Amino acid sequence: MTKRFNDRTQSIATISGNAWLVQDRATAMVEAGEDILFLSIGDPDFETPAAITEAACRALRSGRTHYAPVPGESDLRDAIAHQAQTQSGTQTGRENVTIFTGAQPALFAIMQILAQQGDEILVPEPYYATYPVVALASGAHFKPVACLPEDGFLLQLSALKAAVTPNTRVLLLNSPGNPTGAAFKRKELQAIIEFCQSKDIWVVSDEVYASLCYDEPHISAWEFATHTSNTLENDRLIVVNSLSKSHAMTGWRIGWTLAPVDVAEKLLTLCEGSQFGCPQFVQDAAVVAIAENHPELLIMKQEYRARRDFVVNALNNIPNIKCTTPVGGMFVMADIRQLTSDCAGFAMALLEQQKVATIPGSSFGATAKGHLRITLAQSQVVLSEALSRIAVFSQHFNK
Ligand SMILES: Cc1ncc(COP(=O)(O)O)c(C=O)c1O
């Protein structure tokens, strides 16, 4: 007898399509003993700051290995609320904060409670490659809104207005963005949020790269919340964040949402039935991460910035490759449209011939076609060698 599975999960199983072909091939090549330079991964190459790791070890030794409260430990929620209020000026309490095992499950849970069949979730494109699954798993329609390279890959209010229909339920923002590194300025973000609020559209703002803004301070959507922590609010605004990128803690799996209280209550029900709380010792370490200063973080950010400048400069010195400077995040987009529109073919050939793994822009939506995403999570030595190989390859590709 044929096995039966849930129709919705079946239908999203093939969504990522060919997005990871180059990455999968690179992994197979490594397993076959080849030496590959990976410019594809967004996993910080820095260690978690020592004081945070120490705090986790202390917590483990003192027996913090039991179930934790489902919405999160109170001291961690307080630390996050305090930080959010200090940075945004918006009154925030622990009742606005829900702890998740990373931003990813937080995004998943949010879409489950906000959207359903018949609704549209608008996502500026290029988008982070997991967004289609996150949106479609709710049953809603995933609707990309093109953000052109000529506009710095940033969502334009006019494009948003043109895309909105009576079925639009959620706008999922990501600033600074993966893969583009584009980030909103205050006026533009405010206009987009105000427009959405006037149309009863939820704004979900994924801010996992907030701490990696290199030229200007990060503008959080939370600034534009009008609610106070102890009222049932009218705002349709949720912020998602985590320690993955900001503190080089991808493997710790710790993130959170800032949301109106009624949303937090609904998230709690989902969390009860899914993650059932996050590890106590990880939450203890997260309090230290948030409440204390860690000199390593400044060093890390300065290094990312130096790498960004190095990569942008090197790419712009390669004939027929262009690159604009991302204002934040962990990636640079190399514009190879003068060489080819087939960035997936280019990336695969680059891997086969020069042993350099990148992610083709087409993995992040049609507007990123003709681009390669290059990570900043590699040392300047690796970046330098890889960029030399890209230069050689693109000259050959030209002929
Ligand atoms: C834009 C964006 N959102 C969310 C995530 C997932 O973050 P986390 O590790 O907190 O689940 C990533 C990871 O790369 C990301 O790039």
Image (spheres, helix red, strand yellow):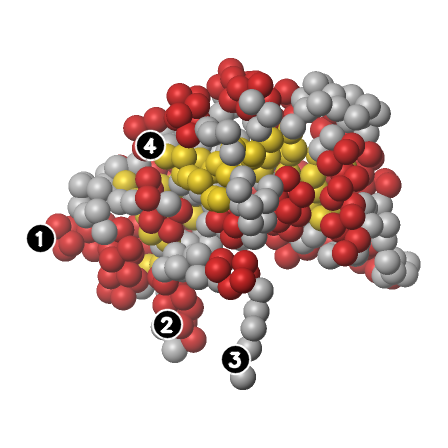
Q: Name the residue under label 4.
A: 148
| Label 1 element class | loop
The residue that mark 3 highlights is: 2
Element under disc 3: loop
Viewer-closest of 350 and 129: 129
- Label 4 to label 3: alpha-carbon separation: 45 Å
Q: How far apart are marks 2 and 4 (CA)?
A: 34 Å
Q: Do the residues labelled 2 and 3 touch (CB within 8 Å)?
A: no
- Which of the marked residues, 4 or 3, is nearer the chain's N terminus? 3
Mark 4 touching mark 3, by CB under 8 A? no
Kindly report the distance in space between the C-alpha atoms of the residues bearing marks 3 and 1.
52 Å
Chain-order first, disc 2 or disc 1: 2
Mark 4: secondary structure: loop
* Mark 2: amino acid: Met
Q: Where is residue 265 in the image (x, y as percent from the top left)?
A: 79, 39
Viewer-closest of 19 and 331: 19
The residue under label 2 is 29
- Which image quadrant for residue 86? top right
| Mark-to-mark CA distance, 2 and 3 | 35 Å
Instruction: Report the residue marked by disc 1.
Output: 399
Number of the label disc, if any, that sits on residue 172: none
